[in-house]
Image: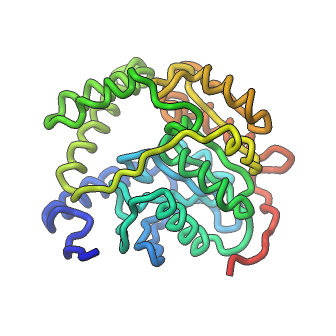
């Protein structure tokens, strides 16, 4: 794959424009952090790291057409107990740069395993994924269960149920140019945070504006669709897993998703988050963060060392 000097951006000026926005948004990260570019055969992965170095590792995967900064509402709580690694997914609108094509699920899983091996070569990992990141986390847990201690799936895209017809009908117009349809889509998708007041509405408007700028700045980004796991795959999830979904989820019916998991994968823990939908990580930030911490700490103190695994050499 021949790459331009500005890859993955459209031009040098587009790169500069996006980096300026990213830096502005990153200034809101509420705790001390360091950043690292992790070099692997798949490319360079941008990682923001917080928390004490001796705390057990917790890796965070964001949703589609986003980046690691989506964890701003949760990072203070999580990094108080864990060494957090918030990744910019390599095929999305962050600062990671792919070196080879990332067009299939297997490519993403290979990339993620490369990064985790470089960041955390020994010991087991707690993994959290939101939306598309949740789907990716579930697939990683199926492929590499020995590398993980526990997994949290926050409203994972597909994974449990196909996306609803309502979601498809609301999302399709966003393919048209202009910001109007994007606003309508996000106002609908993130209804609970929209209803929280002026600050919530301003946050959604900012997300829409950032999406529009990213589309203007980035060259074509590869799309890898999230898929629904079969009954057998859900039953094969042996890593302790927590599934969280907002009661007002729009991607698929929340209660039907819980019913399916409780029926076919009773080994998974589930929880319905009130007064939240696909915005659960911010609309109910404190509750979601504490629920995750409680799950990770089940049987241990959150800051205690994870059970060691052999080196991944």
**Residue at (51% x, 42% y) in the render:** 227
Left or right of residue 5, residue 169 in this image: right
Q: Is residue 4 left or right of residue 201?
A: left
Q: Residue furthest bottom?
A: 313
Tell me the quarter of the picture where residue 85 sits: bottom right
Q: Is residue 170 above or below residue 265?
A: above
Write down the quadrant of residue 42 in the picture: bottom left
Q: Is residue 240 above or below residue 217?
A: above
Location of residue 146 in the rendering, given as x and y in whole percent from the top left corner: 74, 63
Can the viewer see residue 199?
no
Residue at (59, 52) in percent of width and height? 139
| In the displayed structure image, the side of residue 214 where residue 129 appears, left or right | right
Left or right placement of residue 303 versus residue 273 in this view = right
- Position of the N terminus, as image quadrant, is bottom left
Quadrant location of residue 250? top left
Indicate the quadrant containing the C terminus: top left, top right, bottom left or bottom right: bottom right
251 and 48: which is toward the camera: 251
Q: How is the image coloured?
A: rainbow
Q: Nearer the viewer, residue 19 or 249?
A: 249
For the point 61% across and 21% down, the residue is: 256
Q: Name the one closer to the observer, 69 or 231.
A: 231
- Above or below, 249 against 179 in this view is above
Residue 259, given in percent of the width and then of the height, sits at: 68, 23
Residue 207 seen by the camera: yes
Question: How many numbered discs?
Answer: 0
Q: Residue at the right extreme?
A: 299
Residue 262 on image: x %, y %: 74, 28
Q: Which residue is depicted at the point 61% across and 48% down?
A: 138
**Residue 209 picture location, percent across and down:** 23, 39
């Amino acid at each position: 794959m021949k790459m331009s000097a500005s890859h993955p951006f459209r031009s040098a000026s587009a790169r500069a424009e996006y980096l300026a926005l990213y830096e502005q948004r990153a200034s809101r990260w509420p705790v001390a952090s360091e950043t690292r570019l992790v070099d692997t055969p798949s490319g360079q992965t941008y990682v923001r790291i917080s928390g004490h170095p001796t705390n057990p590792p917790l890796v965070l995967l964001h949703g589609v057409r986003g980046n690691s900064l989506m964890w701003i509402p949760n990072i203070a709580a999580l990094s108080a107990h864990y060494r957090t690694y918030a990744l910019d997914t390599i095929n999305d609108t962050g600062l990671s740069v792919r070196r080879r094509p990332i067009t299939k699920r297997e490519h993403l899983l290979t990339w993620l395993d490369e990064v985790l091996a470089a960041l955390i070569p020994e010991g087991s990992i707690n993994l959290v994924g939101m939306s598309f990141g949740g789907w990716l986390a579930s697939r990683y847990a199926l492929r590499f269960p020995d590398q993980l201690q526990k997994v949290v799936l926050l409203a994972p895209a597909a994974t449990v149920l196909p996306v609803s017809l309502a979601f498809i009908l609301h999302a399709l117009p966003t393919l048209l140019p202009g910001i109007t349809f994007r606003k309508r889509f996000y106002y609908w998708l993130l209804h609970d945070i929209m209803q929280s007041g002026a600050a919530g509405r301003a946050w959604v408007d900012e997300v829409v504006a950032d999406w529009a700028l990213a589309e203007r700045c980035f060259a074509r980004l590869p799309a890898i669709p999230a898929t629904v796991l079969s009954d057998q795959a859900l039953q094969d999830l042996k890593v302790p897993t927590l599934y969280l979904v907002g009661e007002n989820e729009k991607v698929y019916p929340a209660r039907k998703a819980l019913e399916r998991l409780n029926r076919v994968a009773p080994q998974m823990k589930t929880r319905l988050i009130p007064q939240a939908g696909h915005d659960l990580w911010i609309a109910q930030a404190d509750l979601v963060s504490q629920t995750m911490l409680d799950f990770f700490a089940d049987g241990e103190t959150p800051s205690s060392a994870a059970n060691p695994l052999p080196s991944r050499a």
